[in-house]
Image: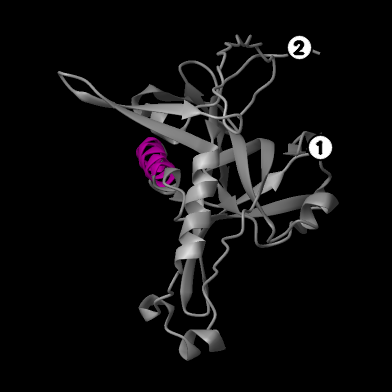
């Protein structure tokens, strides 16, 4: 097997002027600096299980990826898709209508933007340093987020429509960290006693005991000189000075031959 070391680009790193097209009979290739464009996506919400679709006796596994406004890179991704599709529209014949990568779903008077992709047999799903099956990924619906690496290298055309093909190479499964909302409860003692306005008297015997305990821990000797006054603090056996040693570590980085996030 031949392995190629590729680094995916972020949406903000793609130069749309470097996109070029090669027209073949059945499809149109998309090139980015004379090769395919490898794109790392923002974080998507995984809130709908993978759907199996049968088309012309072939079964496809469709993955719905919902955009997350909380991720700042989402807007960079949307901007890149818009620019890429605008450039592609200007290249394709006007009699074809584009099918946009980003689609809209309405439910419960709310609008959701999502991306739908067909998973391949060779699509690699990674979670906690191991590979998942589609069934295992489905079991994590609504409990994880997803990030993908797409290969963008082709324009599909069918029934007077065309679109940019997103080939999913890798899926990274990310745990959702729950936000813990916690607040104080009403306690009956809060209303019974106002501690901020309560004064506690300490007798002379208690004050003497506190002073003696402090003197056993730290002894303070004040000395005066002609130029200035200073305080000398002598630590007893209950407190010792410690010396800290600094250490430095060196790390070695290794290169991976596979496409990584």
Q: Is residue 108 left or right of residue 78?
A: right
Quadrant for the C terminus in the image: top right
Quadrant for the N terminus in the image: top right
Residue ID for mark 1 = 131
Q: Is residue 85 magenta?
A: yes
Residue 47 in view, yes or no: yes
Main secondary structure of the magenta stretch: helix
Residue 111 horizontal/vertical position (percent): 46, 69
The front one of 72 and 154 is 72
Point out the stretch of residues depicted in magenta.
76-91
Q: Nearer the viewer, mark 2 or mark 1?
A: 1
Q: Is 251 situated above or below 233?
A: above
Residue ID for mark 2 = 2
Residue 54 in view, yes or no: no
Q: Is residue 158 magenta?
A: no
The front one of 139 and 52 is 139
Q: Is residue 206 left or right of residue 82?
A: right
Picture quarter containing residue 233? top left
Packing grade of label 1 (10 A; few <14, some 14-19, many >=20) is some
Packing grade of label 2 (10 A; few <14, some 14-19, many >=20) is few
Q: Is 2 situated above or below 78?
A: above
**Residues at discs 2 and 1 in contact (Cβ within 8 Å):** no
Picture quarter containing residue 221? top left
Q: Considering the numbered disc 2 on the image, is that residue within a helix, a strand or a loop?
A: loop
The residue drawn where x is 47% and y is 31% is 10
């Amino acid at each position: 097997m031949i392995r190629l070391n590729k680094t995916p680009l972020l949406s903000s790193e793609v130069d749309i002027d470097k996109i070029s097209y090669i027209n073949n009979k059945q499809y149109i290739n998309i090139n980015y600096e004379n090769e395919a464009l490898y794109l790392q996506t923002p974080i998507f919400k995984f809130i709908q299980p993978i759907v199996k679709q049968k088309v012309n006796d072939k079964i496809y596994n469709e993955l719905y990826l919902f955009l997350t406004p909380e991720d700042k890179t989402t807007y960079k991704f949307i901007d890149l898709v818009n620019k890429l599709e605008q450039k592609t529209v200007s290249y394709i014949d006007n009699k074809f209508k584009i099918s946009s990568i980003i689609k809209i779903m309405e439910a419960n008077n709310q609008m959701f933007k999502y991306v739908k992709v067909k998973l391949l047999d060779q699509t690699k799903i990674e979670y906690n340093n191991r590979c998942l099956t589609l069934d295992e990924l489905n079991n994590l619906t609504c409990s994880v987020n997803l990030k993908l690496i797409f290969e963008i290298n082709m324009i599909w055309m069918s029934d007077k429509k065309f679109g940019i093909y997103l080939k999913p190479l890798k899926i990274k499964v990310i745990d959702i960290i729950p936000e813990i909302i916690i607040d104080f409860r009403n306690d009956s003692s809060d209303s019974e006693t106002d501690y901020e306005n309560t004064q506690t008297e300490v007798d002379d015997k208690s004050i003497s005991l506190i002073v003696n305990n402090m003197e056993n821990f730290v002894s303070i000797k004040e000395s005066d000189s002609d130029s200035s006054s200073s305080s000398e603090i002598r630590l007893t056996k209950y407190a010792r000075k410690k010396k800290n040693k600094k250490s430095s570590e060196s790390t070695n980085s290794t290169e991976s031959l596979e496409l990584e996030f």
